[in-house]
Image (cartoon, rainbow, N blue to C red):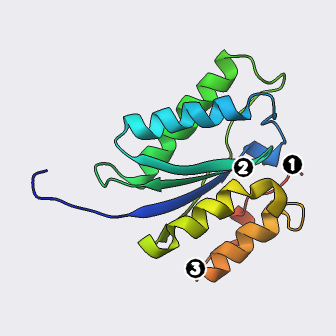
């Protein structure tokens, strides 16, 4: 739309179904590149992407030409198809339902990028579950414990 200018930064977090550690170091960079392509082909800018074997963090410059939920739906659906098509896992692969989306100001961009880039070191000290609960509390987001990303029961 002409004369529309935005500056929106969103940090997304989502997990592999049942938090299975299925994202392997041998192909995680390829997955990151594939997801970056999806995000950028939708008109957004990938600022940082990283994660652990059981979850992923994306930080994007968001263009409000589609809903956040539609963007994440496409990212999850297309990346799931890619993982399955490439036969990268032996067990069924999918992303867990739901996601976290946290907005940030321009002044926080460098900090959030560094945080995402350092996920592996960060998780030597803190579990994903604890990290996620802390994020929800920090941003004052009400949540239902029943729907937090959980391990296979």
Of tags 2 and 3, the one toward the viewer is 2
Tag 3 residue: 139
Look at the numbered disc 2 and give the secondary structure of its residue.
Answer: strand
Residue neighbourhood size for the residue with mark 2, other residues' Cα within 10 Å, grouped as few (<14), some (14–19), many (≥20): many
- Report which quarter residue 132 is drawn in: bottom right
Q: In the figure, 33 relative to 59: above or below? A: above
Q: In the figure, 45 relative to 9: above or below? A: above
Q: Residue 134's spot in the image, x, y percent?
A: 72, 76
**Residue at 57% across / 39% down in the picture?**
76
**Residue at 80% across / 28% down in the picture?**
26
Look at the numbered disc 3 and give the secondary structure of its residue.
Answer: loop
Task: Answer with left or right where residue 71 lies relative to residue 102.
Answer: left
Tag 1 residue: 152
CA distance for labels 1 and 3: 27 Å
Q: Are marks 1 and 3 in contact (CB under 8 Å)?
A: no
Tag 2 residue: 51
Residue 105 appears in the rendering:
no
**Residue at 76% across / 22% down in the picture?**
88
Task: Answer with left or right where residue 52 lies relative to residue 70.
Answer: right
Of marks 2 and 1, which one's residue comes earlier in the chain?
2
**Residue at 41% across / 55% down in the picture?**
61
Q: Residue 33's spot in the image, x, y percent?
A: 58, 33
CA distance for labels 2 and 3: 20 Å
Residue neighbourhood size for the residue with mark 3, other residues' Cα within 10 Å, grouped as few (<14), some (14–19), many (≥20): few
Of marks 1 and 3, which one's residue comes earlier in the chain?
3
Of tags 1 and 3, the one toward the viewer is 3
Of marks 2 and 3, which one's residue comes earlier in the chain?
2
Q: Nearer the viewer, residue 87 or 107?
A: 107
Of tags 2 and 1, the one toward the viewer is 2
């Amino acid at each position: 739309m002409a004369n529309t200018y935005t500056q929106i930064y969103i940090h997304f977090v989502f997990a592999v179904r049942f938090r299975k550690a299925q994202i392997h170091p041998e192909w995680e960079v390829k997955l990151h590149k594939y997801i970056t392509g999806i995000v950028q082909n939708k008109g957004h800018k990938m600022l940082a992407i990283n994660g652990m074997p059981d979850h992923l963090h994306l930080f994007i410059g968001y263009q409000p030409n589609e809903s956040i939920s539609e963007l994440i739906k496409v990212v999850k659906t297309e990346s799931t198809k890619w993982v399955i098509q490439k036969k990268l896992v032996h067990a069924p692969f999918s992303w867990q339902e739901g996601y976290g989306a946290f907005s940030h100001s321009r002044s926080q961009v460098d900090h959030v990028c560094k945080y995402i880039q350092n996920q592996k070191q960060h998780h030597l000290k803190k579990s994903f579950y604890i990290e996620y609960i802390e994020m929800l509390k920090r941003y004052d987001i009400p949540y239902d414990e029943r729907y937090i990303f959980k391990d296979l029961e």
